[in-house]
């Protein structure tokens, strides 16, 4: 009542909860408040259970009821849930033996909040068949790595990828060795194209190792780059 006494004879008034920003109670929270939000009083007390909120931010709970003064809870700091998935950016195509592809692996909870707590090791994989395919810890020089650590206090980590074999390759970031798909933390993948470098030599291939005098033989000449990838953009006559 007006004197802050509990109206124990009230078991009908319905009170509705909503989430608002702690910094601006006139603005709805950015997440979703889940659960039964409209509950009737029982002996003057309204009890809510099983509520959850999906966005990591500071909120207050707003309680409204027809004919009653709106009230707000104390500030509630909502933290991210545990890491649910990794994501990878999608860098542009790279040239064989050229500039490395720059990657960022980022961790999120199941509600797409960035996760910054704890240290996590992310294992790196490529489907490339190239002998010199490698992950690096720097854009140039640096060390070859097979995993990357996301530090506590950070939601992401950077690494680079180098390859000399042209083709379409899958880059995978996983919480496990070997990669385990959606088991545990969901793995992230990116489709990366490595294009051939400019042709630097010809490769001549005969259709057979022997032939009969007066017979014919098929000869194939391909324009290859330094790493023996065929330069599919090469368009010059050869003799």
Image (cartoon, grey):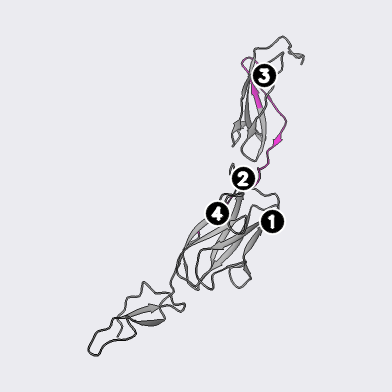
Question: In front of the other: label 1 or label 4?
Answer: 4
Q: Which mark's residue is nearer the viewer, 3 or 2?
A: 2
Q: Which mark is residue 69?
A: 3
Give the magenta part as a residue range.
62-90
- Give the alpha-carbon distance from disc 2 to disc 4, as whole Å: 14 Å
Q: Which residue is mark 4?
A: 188
Instruction: Quote the CA–CA distance across marks 1 and 4.
Output: 18 Å
Q: In 3D space, how far apart are the residues under numbered discs 2 and 1 (Cα atoms)?
A: 16 Å
Depth order, front residue of 184/47: 184
Q: CA distance from mark 3 to mark 4?
A: 49 Å
- Tag 1 near tag 4, CB within 8 Å: no
Where is residue 4? Give x, y as percent.
76, 16
- What residue would you read off at disc 1? 151
Secondary structure beneath label 2: loop
Sooner in the amino-acid sequence: mark 3 or mark 4: 3
Q: Is residue 25 visible?
A: no
Residue 170, how many percent across, how many down? 50, 60
Left or right of 180, for residue 9: right
**Residue at the spot 52% in from the left edge and 56% down from the top edge:** 189
Occupied quadrant, residue 13: top right
């Amino acid at each position: 009542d007006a004197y802050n006494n509990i109206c124990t004879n009230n078991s009908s008034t319905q009170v509705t909860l909503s989430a608002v920003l702690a910094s601006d109670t006139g603005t709805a929270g950015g997440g979703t408040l889940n659960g039964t939000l409209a509950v009737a009083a029982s002996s003057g007390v309204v009890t809510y259970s099983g509520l959850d909120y999906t966005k990591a931010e500071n909120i207050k709970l707003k309680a409204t009821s027809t004919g009653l003064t709106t009230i707000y809870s104390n500030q509630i700091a909502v933290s991210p849930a545990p890491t649910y998935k990794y994501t990878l950016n999608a860098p542009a195509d790279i040239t064989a033996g050229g500039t490395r592809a720059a990657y960022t692996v980022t961790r999120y909870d199941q509600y797409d909040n960035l996760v910054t707590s704890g240290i996590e090791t992310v294992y790196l994989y490529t489907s490339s068949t190239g002998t010199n395919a490698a992950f690096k810890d720097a854009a140039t020089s640096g060390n070859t790595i097979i995993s990357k650590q996301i530090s506590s206090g950070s939601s992401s980590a950077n690494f680079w990828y180098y390859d000399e074999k042209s083709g379409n390759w899958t880059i995978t970031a996983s919480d496990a060795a070997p990669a385990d798909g959606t088991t545990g933390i969901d793995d992230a993948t990116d489709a990366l194209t490595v294009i051939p470098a400019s042709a630097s030599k010809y490769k001549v291939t005969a259709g057979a190792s022997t032939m009969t005098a007066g017979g014919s033989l098929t000869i194939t000449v391909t324009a290859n780059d330094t790493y023996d990838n065929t330069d599919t953009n090469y368009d010059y006559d050869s003799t």
